[in-house]
Image: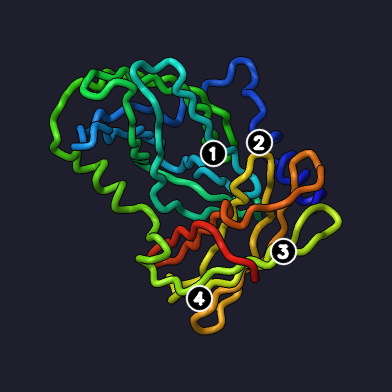
């Protein structure tokens, strides 16, 4: 498994080498902040909008074996207490034989913004570090700014559509149970997640996030028998150190052709 992780890392690094002097390259992605609307509780719904050139993609919060995880820094913002990101259901891509998870085209990432001082304008400053890939992978940085001072409560249609595109919750998807059996391996912990839920359509893909920083998950093997979905893989620490998992922090995402499901936490299996 360490070899697999190293191979993925080397692939990403090799494909992200800087362009040679004299090469002509225009950034395949542009970004902006959609200022959105004010909510009755004082929070604001806004969004980061990324427009990718045809054939290019960027990555979901858990990018897969060869992906580059996105990073957001809001430190330059004013009157901002906290930010929550809603991730629409992503797409599944194959990169040099390895599976990656992300988006293409016009990407809207809704934000829920909590102000320090309710009723006062907010200035939003976002420093983004993302990976964008086509035939090569390019780490890309951008800074986006906007003043949020409009008190309109009217939803922005494209942000509302992105909110509606989020994965279903476990309750919405009819998940009856989710258990996780853990056992030690040479490099970390083997995880076997067993979920009782209706089919999400087609060949389902499962992503398991440990919910703790510094932990890496292998590609998950998935089998379905009737109303039960079985997902098996391995979780390891990036530095190879011993680890323990909090089952309540584990997050399981099921991606199907009909819809996606977001399962928060699992019980002992």
Q: Quadrant of the N terminus?
A: bottom right
Q: Which mark is residue 253?
A: none
Q: Residue at x 34, y 22 (%)?
A: 116
First in sequence: mark 1 vs mark 3: 1
Q: Nearer the viewer, mark 2 or mark 4?
A: 4
Residue 233 picture quarter: bottom right
Q: Residue at x 65, y 20 (%)?
A: 20
Q: CA distance from mark 1 to mark 3?
A: 34 Å
Residue farthest to the right, as pictured: 186
Question: Callout 1 environment at 10 Å: few (<14), some (14 to 19), or many (20+)?
Answer: many
Question: Callout 4 environment at 10 Å: few (<14), some (14 to 19), or many (20+)?
Answer: some
Asked if residue 21 is positioned above or below residue 34 in the image, the reply reads above
- Mark 2 sits on what residue? 15
- Mark 1 sits on what residue? 133
- Residues at marks 1 and 2 touching, judged by CB atoms closer than 8 Å: yes
Question: Looking at the picture, how far across and down is residue 215, in whole percent?
Answer: 68, 45
Q: CA distance from mark 2 to mark 4?
A: 39 Å
- Residues at marks 4 and 3 touching, judged by CB atoms closer than 8 Å: no
- Mark 3 sits on what residue? 182
Question: Looking at the picture, how far across and down is residue 100, in whole percent?
Answer: 57, 50
- Residues at marks 4 and 1 touching, judged by CB atoms closer than 8 Å: no
Q: In the shown orientation, is residue 109 left or right of residue 21? A: left
Q: In the shown orientation, is residue 27 left or right of residue 22? A: left
Q: Nearer the viewer, mark 3 or mark 2?
A: 3
Asked if residue 125 is positioned above or below residue 247 in the image, the reply reads above
Towards the viewer: 70 or 210: 210
Q: CA distance from mark 3 to mark 2?
A: 34 Å
Q: CA distance from mark 4 to mark 3?
A: 18 Å
Residue 222 picture quarter: bottom right
Helix, strand or loop at label 4? It is strand
- Mark 4 sits on what residue? 196
Q: In the shown orientation, is residue 121 left or right of residue 251? A: left
């Amino acid at each position: 498994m360490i070899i697999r992780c190293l191979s993925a890392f080397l692939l990403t690094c090799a494909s992200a080498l800087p362009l040679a002097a004299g090469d002509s390259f225009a950034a395949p992605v542009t970004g902006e902040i959609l200022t959105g609307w004010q909510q009755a509780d004082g929070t604001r719904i806004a969004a980061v909008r990324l427009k990718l050139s045809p054939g290019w993609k960027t990555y979901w919060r858990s990018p897969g074996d060869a992906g580059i995880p996105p990073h957001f820094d809001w430190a330059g913002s004013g009157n901002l207490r906290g930010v929550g990101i809603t991730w629409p259901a992503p797409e599944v891509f194959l990169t040099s034989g390895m599976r990656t998870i992300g988006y293409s085209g016009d990407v809207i990432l809704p934000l829920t913004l909590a102000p320090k001082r309710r009723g006062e304008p907010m200035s939003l400053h976002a420093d983004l570090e993302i990976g964008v890939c086509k035939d090569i992978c390019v780490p890309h940085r951008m800074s986006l700014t906007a003043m949020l001072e409009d008190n309109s409560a009217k939803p922005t249609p494209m942000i509302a559509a992105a909110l509606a595109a989020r994965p279903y919750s476990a309750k919405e998807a009819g998940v009856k149970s989710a258990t996780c059996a853990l056992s030690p391996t040479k490099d970390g912990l083997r995880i076997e997640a067993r979920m009782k839920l209706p089919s999400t359509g087609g060949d389902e893909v499962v992503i398991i996030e440990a919910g703790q920083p510094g932990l890496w998950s292998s590609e998950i093997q998935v089998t379905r028998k009737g109303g039960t979905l079985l997902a098996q893989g391995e979780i390891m620490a990036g530095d190879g150190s011993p680890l323990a998992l909090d089952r309540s922090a584990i997050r399981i995402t099921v991606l199907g052709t009909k819809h996606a499901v977001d399962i928060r936490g699992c019980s002992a299996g």
